[in-house]
Amino acid sequence: MASAALLVAGAVGCAVMPGSGGGTDTAGDTPPLVDEGFKIGLLLPESETTRYEKFDRPYITRSIKELCPDCTVLHHNAGGDSGQQQQQIDKMITHGVKVLILDAVDAETIAPSVTKAKQQGVKVIAYDRLAEGPIDSYTSFDNVEVGRMQGQALLEALEKGGNPTRGPIVMINGAPADPNAGEFKEGAHAVLDGNVRVGREFDTPDWSPEQAGIEATAAFAALGVDQVIGVYSANDGMAGGIAEAIRLSGAKPGTPLTGQDAELAAIQRILLGTQTMTIYKPIMPQAQSAAHMAIDLAAGRRLRAPTTVSNSTVKGIPSMVIAPMVVTRDNIKGTVVQDGFWSVKEICAPEQLKAACKSTGLI
């Protein structure tokens, strides 16, 4: 993941974590190990999106073990249920965790649980989504920039297809309870507004591919399937449902379609021409940053980070904000393959992808 780590350093600087010997350590170096182990809780929001269990969980666990071999990581996935996640926090507090790495299902409803954890002396790191409540630190990506990148890629695809300023397009955004969804939407509108007409726009309640497909089908029927010139999808999971809706509705093959998360199915759709782009968010440096923050918070070290963010409770939360990358058919090899996120074998396994993999230099 060396190139991803360099991306972080080049984009936002190094997250500096104080060591115990008078020097400093960057987010890419190993700090002095703590004297004894402790428990760290890892709370992930759902399993619909591939990344959480396939990448975030093992990367975080491995990074913590490298920094603190005697530490124990307790893990729960809320399955998209905010009430379940609140119960999981209670369990982890009962089991004596010193730090929680929290990727909230619902940023607002989780606030009382964050407050309860703090009252029990448990430090809380907001991971990927900025939860409300007395958060100690935060690590994520530049979500507004993600939206801008998606919007710009959609505009470029429309211009290439001879539709630079017409419309309509359909916008299918993420779940309103997820603060990242609002930032993706903000960034996309900053680029799209004034350049293309949005015919229909929806906010999915739960990032569901099935619901996204239903919403896309309804939009095609309302606007005219032969009139829609492109679709903004906030992530790859929903893009899968939308791509199927495009196929079944009789919309023009290759209708520009955005995505995010660099899921394997999305990379394959990009090669097949049924999705235009995705956003690759280098998860390893994010996981390493969370692990460093967890160790330092438990050890009582003062966090110093490249930037700060604020929620409605806390101002100036130490933060590591990582730069995302656009992935198209032309740079799959230099992004997700180069970083080991997906292998050529995984991407090109289906027989129908052999020709596309050859033409793009993957095989």
Image: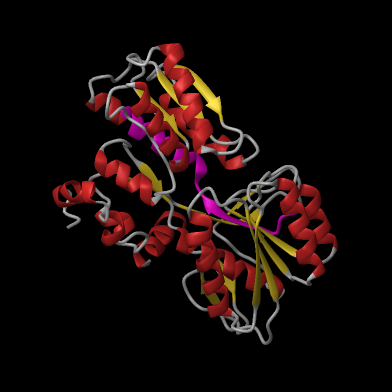
Color scheme of the displayed model: secondary structure
Please tell me how many numbered marks the rendered image carries. 0
**Residue 335 drawn in magenta:** no
What residue occupies the far bottom of the structure in this picture?
A: 35
Choose top left, top right, bottom left or bottom right for residue 69: bottom right
Depth order, front residue of 311/115: 115
Depth order, front residue of 217/40: 217
Residue 146: image location, x then y, percent: 45, 41
Q: Is residue 76 left or right of residue 264?
A: right
Residue found 40% across the figure and 28% down from its top: 245
Whether residue 53 can be seen here: yes
Quadrant in which the C terminus appears: bottom left
Residue found 16% across the figure and 54% down from its top: 361
Residue 345 vertical position relative to residue 211 in the rendered view, above or below: below
Depth order, front residue of 51/116: 51
Depth order, front residue of 185/260: 260
Region in magenta: 134-155
Whether residue 286 can be seen here: no
Residue found 53% across the figure and 79% down from its top: 66
Residue 59: image location, x then y, percent: 50, 67
Q: Is residue 24 left or right of residue 342?
A: right
Residue 43: image location, x then y, percent: 65, 59
Q: Is residue 277 left or right of residue 125?
A: left
